[in-house]
Amino acid sequence: MNAAFLHGVGDIRISQIPAPQPKEDELLLRVRAVGICGSDLHCYVDGGTDGSDWGAPLILGHEIAAEVVDDSAAVAGLPGLAAGSLVAVDPGRSCGDCEWCRRGHGNLCPDILFSGSPPDTHGALCEYITAPLANLYAVPPGFSAAEAAILELLGVAIHTLDLAAVRPGESALVLGAGPLGLLLAQLSRHLGAGSVYVVDPLAYRCATARELGVDEVAGSHHAVAEWTNGRGVDVVLEATNSASALQQAAAGVRIGGRLILAGIPDNDHVSVGASLMRRKGLTLKVVRRMAPGVYPRAIELVRCGAINLQRLATHSFSLQQTAEAFELQANHRDGVIKSVIEL
C-alpha cells in the first residue's frame, strides 16, 4: 500500500509498504480521510512537538476516518461495524492498567501509543490501518469522511471546555482562530457564554470566526481591554503556537479568572510574568488530548447541528498530494483552515 512518510523537516515522500495485519482484538480499516493537525505541522516544520530528536521516517496522521473492510465485527455481534461502515478512530491506545488509566484519565497514560507520534508509532496517512474495536466509533448517516476525521479535534475542544467549566453568561476569549480555536469558540457559544471574543493575527481566520458567530474579533490581544472596559474576560482558551500566548492570556483575563492552555508552542516553551499571574490569583490548566468517553458527545454535537465541522475542512488533497497539503497549511496560504487528505 501507499504511505506518506515524513523523512525530516519539510520532507514528505510517498512509499510502498505492506498492508498491516489486524490482531485478534482489531479490525482492518481502509482510511478515508485524515485531517492535518497542529501537532503534525510541528513535526513537519520543527521536527517534533517537544524538541527531541525522534528520527525518521514516520507516518503522521491522527485525525482519522476509515471504512470497515469486512464483516468480522458484525458477525461477532457489533452491527454498527459492518463492512462499509464509516467510523471515527480514536488514535490513542492507553495501557488501561496504570494509576492514571484506573482513575479514568487514559489521556494522561505515560505509556499511551498515539497514532503518528514520534519516535515510531505510525499514523494514518496511508491506505490501510488497524485499530482496536474499542477505538472505533460508527458515525451516523450524512457525516462526510472529513467531518468524521475532525471529530478527534472536536473531542480535544470538548475536553478543553470541560476543564474551563464555562458558566452561562460568562465571557470567553479564544486566542488563535485555527481549527481548534474555531471549535472552542463554537463550543463556548453553545455552552451559553455571554460574550465570545477571538484574537488571531490572520485576517481571514478572524473573518471565519465572525462567520461562525463570535461577538468580536481582532488581530491583537490589546483589544480585550476595550471590549471588556478594562475588566478582562472570565476565561481564556489558548489555541496558538506562540510562546507569548500565555502572557497575552494572563493580560486579558479578569482577576481570579481561568486560563486553559490547549495549543502547542513553537520550540516547546511559553513565558509569562509570575507577578501578573500571582497578583490576579489566576487558575491555570493545561490540556492533554481528551478524557475517555468524549467521542459520543462529539458525534452528537455535530449530528444535532450545534457544531460546524465542514466549514473547517477548507482544502482536500489526495494521499499523493500530502506534501502539498502540509506546505499549504504550514504557510497559511489560500485561506486554509484545515487541509484534509481524502482517499
Image: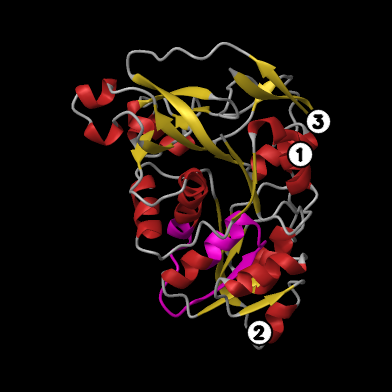
Q: Residues within 10 Å of mark 2 (few under 14, many from 20)?
A: some
Q: Is residue 122 above or below residue 213?
A: above
Amino acid type, mark 2:
Trp
Q: Residues within 10 Å of mark 1 (few under 14, many from 20)?
A: some
Residue at image location 76% in from the left, 39% down from the top = 324
Report the disc number at residue 9: 3
Residue 308 lies in the magenta stretch? no
Marks 3 and 1 sit apart, C-alpha to C-alpha, by: 14 Å
Which residues lie in the magenta part?
Answer: 161-185
Report the disc number at residue 226: none
332 vs 145, nearest the viewer: 145
Report the disc number at residue 227: 2
Q: Which residue is label 1 attached to?
A: 324
Amino acid type, mark 3:
Val
Quadrant into which the C terminus falls: top right
Position in image of residue 120 (x %, y %): 62, 19
Question: Left or right: 91 with respect to 334?
Answer: left
Query: At numbered mark 1, what does the secondary structure look like: helix, strand or loop?
Result: helix
Q: Earlier in the sequence, mark 1 or mark 2?
A: 2
Marks 2 and 3 sit apart, C-alpha to C-alpha, by: 40 Å
Question: Left or right: 87 with respect to 185?
Answer: left
Q: Earlier in the sequence, mark 2 or mark 3?
A: 3
Q: Is residue 8 above or below residue 138?
A: above
Query: At numbered mark 3, what does the secondary structure look like: helix, strand or loop?
Result: loop
Q: Is residue 124 above or below residue 227?
A: above
Position in image of residue 92 (x %, y %): 47, 32
Picture quadrant where residue 83 is located: top left
